[in-house]
Image (cartoon, rainbow, N blue to C red):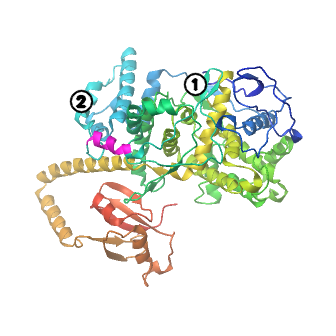
Amino acid sequence: MNWLSNSQGVVLTAYHHSSKDRAVAESHGQGGEEATSSRRYGQYTMNQEIPKVKEKPSFDRSSSQDSVDELSMEDYWTELENIKKSSENRQDQEVVVVKEPDEGELEEEWLKEAGLSNLFGESAGDPQESMVFLSTLTRTQAAAVQKRVETVSQTLRKKNKQHHIPDVRDIFAQQTESNEKAPDGTESQSVRTNENKYQGKDDQASSLVVGEKEMIPLVPEEAPVSETDINLEVSFAEQAVDQKENSKDRTQKSKGNDAPLPSFRLPKDKTGTTRIGDLAPQDMKKVCHLALIELTALYDVLGVELKQQKAVKIKTKDSGLFGVPLTVLLEQDQRRVPGTRIPLIFQNLISQIEEGGLETEGLLRIPGASIRIKNLCQELEAKFYEGTFPWESVKQHDAASLLKLFIRELPQPLLSAEYLRAFQAVQNLPTKKQQLQALNLLVILLPEANQDTLKALLEFLQRVIDNKEKNKMTVMNVAMVMAPNLFMCHPLALKSSEQQEFAMAVGTANIMHLLIKHQKLLWTIPKFLVNQVRKQNTENLKKDKKTMKKLLKKMAYDREKSEKQDRSTNDADVPQGVIRVQAPHLSKVSMAIQLTEELKASDVLARFLSQESGIAQTLKKGDVFLYEIGGNIGGRCLDDDTYMKDLYQLNPNAEWVVKPKPS
């Protein structure tokens, strides 16, 4: 596949029955709004997209008799055709190819992203600095790092670099024993055995043959679903290894079945669910490093290529609304509305669509007139920040078209330039569960501005789907309409050949389906990553204490003073089984609370807020949160269902603080 080949849509022009050639029946949609599709058995003949679609097979949107293999891609092709028409008079973004990187350079960039740049090159330092980090990795994570280090080492040697070239044997010499253990110190085999209880209900991807390619079919809309737990306590890549070893027979038998999409759920975690935005910045940075390594390990285990996009630059505008980077938009908006996390134009377009009523049939699917959209763009650019744009004159379908246009014209994709191709590659993972796990890691890796805007978009799309009985926009209809806008219509998107185009369409529509349906799960940080961060913090703390002890030996006075302080602190400690909750950001109030088996974070907050004196009297639920600070974590906002005694046992040296979330 060429990285920067021009995007060419395809239309289905003919269908050949597996036993007998047969022409597809023709039927024209009203107003040219519906596009091409056909029944799906046998093989398809595909041609490059032509300027005007002449044949439109019939489609009964209300039909419930279609099997998984027969669901129509009509909305997808219609949207692709509408996008082409709307972009005819608009100037394409200019993509400048800087340099085609070699494999070593890509892997070197990967190591930098993973926080391991000190292992190689001019910035190389003492490998011991990375040993704490490496010691927390699982076997599959360590293998992913080792593979990239080997590639970088070979590349540097070929180029006869004079600076430090790492020897993989040196870097991973101390990993031999730790590789046999999980992040929490338990034997990895027992962890892997524990994963067995989560198996058995995971779906297997059924196959649909297009030409000689296999693809994952669209999931039926109203099919009965089973519930499958998503295990967040064990590395996803380790789970994949375990499943490959134990489920080969089941995979082969399941292949070809029209298995419905399971209803994935998160088991309750007594130490609390951690979501994006809950961790202190220093901890979140470590989570991102680990998430990249884990994602790479997962793709490695499943035999899917993962490459980041680093070889292009896109010329961008430094002001305006459309075709402006998210960060620039937010800088503009924050000067007007401090604390803005989602572009104001994006918020206004969603509000305009919702004011027209989400019950409107064909919402998001029916496009606005291209000339009118172009004029509205120009008027918005001129009047939006002046506050003189006449929103009352904007039709609902025009606002929806503008929203999709805004997404398409972002210079860097909403799913980010670095990871757009990794998002596209999710469709190649064998099971829906693994696809969902990969999407979870990818969402964690997105820049904050992209995370916030994507979250707002998915929440809006869910509100549209909630009105599907009236607007006829089911989750799959919405997914097919939005997939081309997020995945396919950007200069950095992975382009496919004509033969692969249909599979790419179905695959990205299914990815969009997962993003919408399981969006709450996707903003959850897996517990195994948080535990790895806890272990890193613990090891770093031990290291710091050793350094401090050496200093104290040379400074007798300071040592004596420190010991006195430690004794006075211990003397003032609260009794065993009691925590002291403080609120230094709000008042001088502190409260000693007895731990019980059933005490939750919500109970602690309720007791604090029920005080009759101080600033707490004016606060209500949602204004402040309980935080776990220090010990083996930098800082973590607790969800209401966190059982305090279980968390205390996990982090006995933490402080408990009530404070508002930073904006």
At x 79% / y 42%, what residue is drawn? 60
Q: Distance between the residues labelled 2 and 1?
A: 38 Å
Graded by Cα atoms within 10 Å as few (under 14), some (14 to 19) or many (20 or more), the crowding at tag 2 reads few
Task: Say what secondary structure mark 2 lies in.
Answer: loop
Q: Using the rendered view, name the quadrant where residue 96 is placed.
A: top right
Q: Position of residue 509 (x, y in %)?
A: 65, 38
The three-letter code of the residue at mark 2 reads Ala
- Decide if residue 579 is in sight here: yes
Task: Look at the picture and state if 629 lies above or below 135.
Answer: below
Residue 547, magenta (yes or no): no
Residue at image location 86% in from the left, 29% down from the top: 54
Q: Main secondary structure of the magenta part?
A: helix
For this view, does 529 lie left or right of residue 394?
A: left
Image location of residue 222, percent across then percent down: 65, 48
Where does residue 372 sit, x and y in percent of width and height? 85, 45
Image quarter of residue 466: bottom right
- Residue 173, disc: 2
Residue farthest toward the front in the current orientation of the protein: 19
In the rendered view, tell whether residue 21 sits above or below residue 314.
above
Q: Measured along the vertical axis of the image, is residue 569 above or below residue 138?
A: below
**10 Å neighbourhood of mark 1: few (<14), some, or many (≥20)?**
few
Q: Earlier in the sequence, mark 2 or mark 1?
A: 1
Image disc number at residue 63: none
The residue drawn where x is 37% and y is 64% is: 643
Quarter of the picture holding the N terminus? top right
Residue beneath disc 1: 98
Magenta-drawn segment = 187-196
